[in-house]
Image (cartoon, helix red, strand yellow):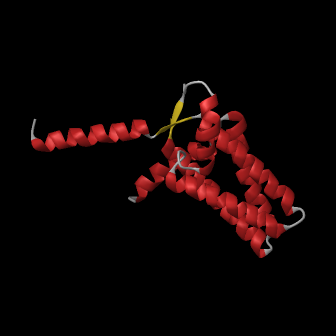
Amino acid sequence: MSVESSESVESVESSESRESSDQVDVRGPRFAAWLTTAVLLGVLAISAFDTTAAAVLLAAQAAVFAIGALRGPRRHPYGLLYAAFVAPRLGPVTEREPAAPLRFAQLVGFVFALAGVLGFGTGLVGLGLVATALALAAAFLNAAFGICLGCQIYPLATRLRAGLGT
């Protein structure tokens, strides 16, 4: 085997091990989705009385989404809570899922949360309500039924990105 093909094999092997280690327990993201659902319900409830307070709470959730998008589900604030307090009380992991689609879903959540913050913060309350409600619907679908909308969109987004040459 030539040095060049040996390097290629090592590259593939390290890529494969990186991918297999980039799998997470499916229960963690669902736990995070339940917490997100609660926060977003709180935002909608608070917005009926104080849109500034709703914007602040939604900005905090946007920060959580941003951390999840940038650092992944293992370093996501709700993921850390899951790992510290919930996972030790559960049985062994029986199902895993890749982290990349979850990170993309967090990015989508961040975009909707940011739109909601801008809406509540600038007096466009309808925008704040709609953006928050859409993020809430996605979080609830994941929490209750294991349907991650951002994860479903992820393959399309990667194909579009590849088609654009970026």
Residue situated furthest bottom in the rendering:
122
Residue closer to the observer: 50 or 113: 50
Q: How many marks?
A: 0
From where the camera sits, is residue 155 visible? no
Say left or right for 30 vs 93. right
From where the camera sits, is residue 48 visible? yes
Q: What residue is shown at x 58% (from left), y 34% (from top)? A: 26
Residue situated furthest right in the rendering:
49
Q: Quadrant of the C terminus?
A: bottom left
| Residue 8 image point, x, y percent | 21, 42
| Residue 4 image point, x, y percent | 13, 44
Q: Quadrant of the N terminus?
A: top left
Q: What residue is shown at x 11% (from left), y 42% (from top)? A: 3
Say left or right for 165 vs 88. left
Q: What residue is shown at x 71% (from left), y 46% (from top)? A: 35
Task: Examine the rendered structure and indicate whether residue 166 appears above or below residue 88.
Answer: below
| Residue 114 image point, x, y percent | 66, 64
Q: What residue is shown at x 56% (from left), y 52% (from top)? A: 68
Residue closer to the observer: 85 or 35: 85
Say left or right for 92 vs 162. right
Residue closer to the observer: 56 or 156: 56
Residue situated furthest left in the rendering:
2
| Residue 79 image point, x, y percent | 59, 44
Task: Examine the rendered structure and indicate whether residue 113 appears above or below residue 14.
Answer: below
Say left or right for 99 vs 35. left
